[in-house]
């Protein structure tokens, strides 16, 4: 197959997001429209913590695989964004403020003992992907951040309007991501365009992005099945 131009390659990547990003999932539509009850929002936040906790792990793996100090320094900012630095809170700490604000026990959240099995499986699969596949595929799998600002804006607006048990402070995690995600996705996109020099390499990037979209979608499938319909909560999982 013919090598895509940079513009065509980017267009193909964005088409994947338009068709597969998890803002389209029924659970998110309910969340953003204020149609969930508090316990369902709690279940979302508790399970999403699993994914949040894996983000710096996968980023540390990618840092260890990047070949130059310049590339490692750029990607290392992602670790600082999520883990915090110099005494400042990172994304994980801000997510715990969200779960605190929802009335969940912080130690239970951090222990991951009440998460859905599918959530843990999907989040760990993402870590294994960036560890085991090529560096190009690992970087490309982060390109869901291309689509993050839209879903973040929808989420914050919808949740503040729909739920009296959340506040701007509760949702402070998302404010930082409005600037971090575009910065990170720009770097990853340019990396993929520069290093996917064959159509086979471009196809690997496209497949990696589909994989990542599937990870996010599958976590919402599990939430919907357990907490919306048919309401089958696995043994040991959060059960309000």
Image (spheres, rainbow, N blue to C red):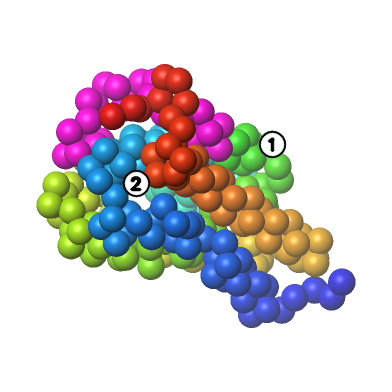
Say which of 185 and 111 sits in front. 111
Residue 53 is situated, as x and y percent measured from the top left of the image, at: 41, 34
Looking at this view, name the residue that lies furthest to the front.
230
Quarter of the image where the N terminus is located: bottom right
Asked if residue 48 can be seen in this view, the reply is: no
Q: Position of residue 222 (x, y in %)?
A: 49, 40
Q: What's the residue at 45%, 57% (across, down)?
A: 26
What are the residue bounds of the magenta stretch?
Answer: 95-122
Vertical arrangement, residue 150 with respect to residue 82, above or below: below
Q: Is residue 145 magenta?
A: no
Quadrant assignment, res 176 = bottom left
Q: From the viewer's perspective, tell me whether residue 82 is left or right of residue 87.
A: right
Q: What element carries label 1?
A: helix
On residue 81, the disc is: 2
Q: Residue at x 26, y 38 (%)?
A: 39
Circle nearer the N terminus (2, 1): 2
Q: How crowded is mark 2: few (under 14 residues within 10 Å), some or many (20 or more)?
A: some
Which residue carries the number 1 mark? 132
In the picture, measured across the screen, residue 233 lies left or right of residue 133, that is left
Q: Is the magenta stretch mostly helix, strand or loop?
A: helix
- Could you tell me which residue is drawn at 26 percent across and 21 percent down? 107
Q: Does the magenta run of residues contain 104? A: yes
Q: Position of residue 156 (x, y in %)?
A: 25, 60
Tell whether 139 sits left or right of 32. Answer: right
Q: Which of 3 and 41 is in front in this view?
A: 41
Asked whether the viewer can see residue 213, the reply is yes
Give me the C-alpha separation between circle 2 and circle 1. 24 Å
Q: In which quarter of the image is the C terminus?
A: top left
Residue 191 drawn at (x, y percent)? 60, 61
């Amino acid at each position: 197959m013919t090598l895509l131009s940079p513009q065509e390659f980017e267009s193909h990547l964005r088409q994947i997001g338009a068709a597969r990003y998890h803002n389209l999932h029924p659970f998110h539509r309910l969340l953003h429209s204020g149609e969930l009850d508090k316990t369902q929002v709690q279940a979302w936040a508790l399970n999403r913590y699993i994914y949040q906790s894996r983000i710096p792990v996968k980023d540390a793996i990618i840092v260890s695989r990047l070949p130059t100090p310049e590339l490692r320094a750029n990607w290392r900012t992602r670790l600082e964004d999520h883990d915090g630095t110099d005494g400042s809170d990172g994304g994980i700490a801000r997510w715990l403020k969200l779960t605190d604000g929802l009335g969940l026990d912080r130690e239970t959240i951090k222990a991951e003992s009440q998460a859905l099995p599918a959530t843990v499986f999907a989040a760990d699969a993402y870590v294994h992907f960036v560890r085991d596949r090529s560096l190009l595929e690992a970087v490309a799998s982060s390109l869901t951040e291309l689509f993050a600002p839209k879903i973040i804006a929808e989420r914050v607006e919808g949740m503040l309007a729909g739920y009296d048990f959340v506040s701007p402070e509760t949702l402070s995690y998302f404010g930082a991501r409005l600037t971090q995600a575009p910065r990170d996705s720009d770097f990853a996109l340019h990396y993929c365009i520069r290093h996917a020099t064959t159509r086979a390499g471009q196809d690997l990037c496209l497949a990696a992005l589909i994989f990542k979209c599937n990870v996010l979608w599958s976590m919402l499938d599990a939430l919907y099945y357990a907490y919306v319909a048919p309401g089958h909560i696995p043994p040991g999982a959060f059960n309000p």
